[in-house]
Image (cartoon, rainbow, N blue to C red):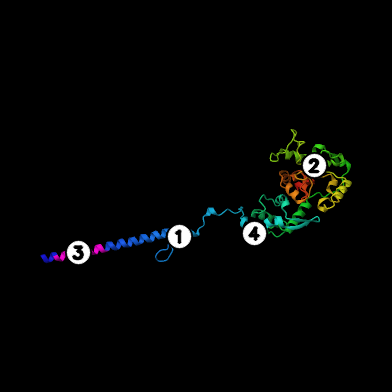
Amino acid sequence: MMKHKKTHLVVFSVALATLLALAALVAKTGHGQSALSSKASTGQPAESGLQPTAAIRERRVAPAASTPAPDATSDGSATLFSAAASRNSALKFELDWAFGGKQQRGWYIYEPLISRLIETDRDSATGGFASALARWQKATAMPSSGVLDDQTLYQMVSAWQGARLKDKTYARPDQLMVAPTSDFYDTSRPDELRQVEHETYAAYKRMIAAAVADPSLNLRHTAAGELAPEEKFLKIVSAFRPREYQEQLRRQSPNSGRAGLAVNSPHFTGRALDLYVGGEPVETKDANRAVQVQTSVYRWLVRNADRFGFRPYYYEPWHWEYVGASATAAK
């Protein structure tokens, strides 16, 4: 009997020792897994020398909010024309070209007319502008690069010049009327220099009424809708010019070139009007023209003058020619 008890005691002791050993092994294994998990969560290397893939993925993915949005357009032109936009940003001020015997640099002075021609309101440094330019280039059978280089600019000049007054027949006395001094920038201008062709004057008055009615221009005006005496914007600086007067101007400005004072001037017709749009009224220096094309009245004329039959002489922001409502409607 005693022998059996000893046997049972030995078996029990062995089993207990085995259970204690298993418990210690489980505790040690759990501690190791916890340490590995802790290192993985901090991105530190594990004992095996491998980095957790989750940590690598977090470092590779850039935060979406930190990336600025591109010049997006509905047709994806921001990406497609990004190189053209960059080139246009440089050429806007650096392009060398010539007109009327005068060297020109850049096309920034003509940007309002360019935007109107290619039918876009996008900034010239954007892909949207380059995309609109490419469409215009394609429509005019040019390579649609979206870059406003010298060949493209000359094509634009041709379009602007081609839309000007064609008939430069010298006006007969019965075709002219003397406009009141209140319509002129210089109220002391004599009668013979305040003459305007009848239809041109009527169209001018309709255009002035529309400009006065546009609150964005904030033009000072009378109760009757006329430009106020103290308002200078859009007043007539020059209209009909006799040949003798034109020749006198040419002698006074011998360096004006063909771009400035033409031998066969459209002012001979009484259908050309120089309007005050800011700065020095008729100064062709780049600095002055750059000021003029930024004024709200000039930009309004670019957008609206053709509704009343007027077309611009692109080189002179103040010069507008009446070609007739039917001609502008067919544009």
> Distance from label 3 to label 4 (Cα)?
85 Å
Q: Is residue 251 magenta?
A: no
Q: Nearer the viewer, residue 59 or 325?
A: 59
Label disc, if present, on residue 236 of the rendered structure: 2
Residue 36 lies left or right of residue 225; in this view the side is left
Of labels 1 and 3, earlier in sequence is 3
Residue 206 picture quarter: top right
> Distance from label 1 to label 3 (Cα)?
49 Å
Of labels 3 and 4, earlier in sequence is 3
Q: Position of residue 331 (x, y in %)?
A: 75, 49
Amino acid type, mark 4: Ala
Q: Is residue 331 visible?
A: no
Q: Residues within 10 Å of mark 2 (few under 14, many from 20)?
A: many
Label disc, if present, on residue 13 of the rendered structure: 3
Q: Residue at x 41, y 60 (%)?
A: 40
Q: According to the image, label 4 marks what residue?
A: 83
Amino acid type, mark 1: Ala
Amino acid type, mark 2: Ile
Image: magenta residue range: 6-21
Q: Position of residue 241 (x, y in %)?
A: 86, 45
Q: Is residue 317 above or below residue 94?
A: above
